[in-house]
Structure formats: C-alpha cells, structure tokens
Image (tube, rainbow, N blue to C red):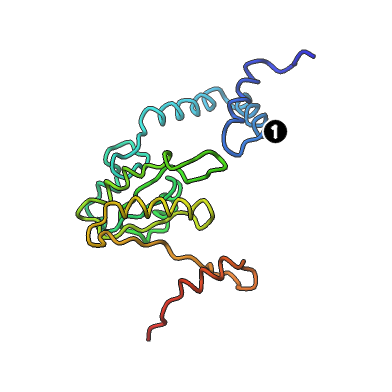
Amino acid sequence: MVSKTPESLEALMAQLERLPGIGPRSASRLAHHLLRVPEADALALADAIRAARERIRPCSLCRAPSESDPCPVCADATRDRTLLLVLETPRDLTAVESAGSYRGLYFVLGARLSPLEGVDATALDLAGLAARARHTDVAEVCIGTNPDLEGDGTALAVVEAVRGVQVDGRPRITRLARGLPTGGQIEYQNASVIADAFDGRRRVEG
C-alpha cells in the first residue's frame, strides 16, 4: 500500500519520535503543528537547536552545559569552594540552583549506572570527578544521585572514585538526606522511605 504521507513529513515525524517521551502520536501531532505555524516560527526552532549545538559545551570543571568556560557557577568567586555536590544530570543542577539554598560547587556525571540500558561506569566522568575532588580547596564531596536502585549503584561508583584520591580522610564523603518528604504522610510511604527516615534521623535541639 502506498503511503499518502509526504516523505519529508514522515522523516520529520521519525526524527521527533526519537526524542525522549515522544511516541508516534505525539510525533505526528508535533510535526503537523510545525507545518501549521508561520514558517518563521518553525525555522526559529531549527535555528535555536543549531545555535545551542554550536555554542554549548561541557564546563571543563563541572561538566555542566555552558556557553562559557568555566561556567558562571564555577567562575563565581562567592561560591563555597570547599563543598562539591555530585549530580547525575544538568537537569538536577538546575533544580538545585532553583531552590536557592545551595552555594557550593557542582560536578555533573552526565549519566547514571543502568546495566539494563547498557550504561556502565565508562559513561560516567569518574576520572574528571576524581581530579576535581583532588583539588586542595575541596573538603567535602556530597553525593546527590537519585534515591533509587540506579542512583545507589551510581553513588557507590562515586564513593570509590573519591576514596581513590582521599588523603587523611579528606575530602570527606557525604550523601543528601533521604526519608519522609515534607508535607507527606507516613501511612502513604513505602518501607524503603520509612527505613531511610529512621537512618537519617537527627537530634532535636533546644
């Protein structure tokens, strides 16, 4: 049966479908949307993609995407250079920065260990992390991987990399607290969350 869809439209849908979370129906909807909007709007999207690919590179220090090297965070002299937070993705960095409570530096692994998806330690820039952790200013490396199976495995790889450059226990290794979420109710939490909450309990002062 001969397809009634133009080849160029099929090619566009095929490329859109390769994006994360985009299935055939969503790809078709987006492709037809791009054909409906004014040509300038559609081409502006193409120009934005091209510009981002040309201008953005990983920061040589923290590996976060940036148009400058070092990135604005690494170049900020007011940041606490004794504290290094290790995250899985640039999206995690954006989330932490948006919270506005962290003033240290970062290191972005760029991936997480996932044997089922074929992602092993070679996908993580552990050598770059070790080099950053070896810096004399860094007193603490805080692991901010996600609290799930893949995140725990990634955290173990980070611990091993940092321990390889420790001198007299410096930098010390910590991990973001886990447990009951603010506003959550105990009866709705799973066993793992409750166990983490007990492990991370703190003294009540005053």
Classify the position of the N terminus by image quarter: top right
Classify the position of the C terminus by image quarter: bottom left
* Percent position of residue 7, x then y: 65, 15
Residue 88 vs 43, above or below: the answer is below
At label 1, counting other C-alpha atoms closer than 10 Å, the crowd grade (few under 14, some 14-19, many 20 or more) is few
Residue 204 vs 83, above or below: the answer is below
Provide the secondary structure element on which disc 1 rests.
helix
Single out the residue that lies furthest toward the right.
1
In the visual, does 127 lie left or right of 121?
Answer: left
* Percent position of residue 186, x then y: 60, 73
Q: Splitting the image into 4 quarters, where does residue 141 fall?
A: bottom left
* Percent position of residue 33, x then y: 63, 29
User: Which residue is at a point 75% across and 16% down the rendered structure image?
Assistant: 4
Q: What residue type is labelled 1?
A: Arg
User: Which residue is at a point 27% across and 46% down the rendered structure image?
Assistant: 131
Residue 96 vs 67, above or below: the answer is below
For disc 1, the marked residue is: 25
User: Which residue is at a point 55% across and 22% down the rendered structure image?
Assistant: 39
In the visual, does 84 lie left or right of 194?
Answer: left
In the visual, does 86 lie left or right of 72?
Answer: right
Residue nearest the observer in this picture, 118 or 179:
118
* Percent position of residue 15, x then y: 58, 26
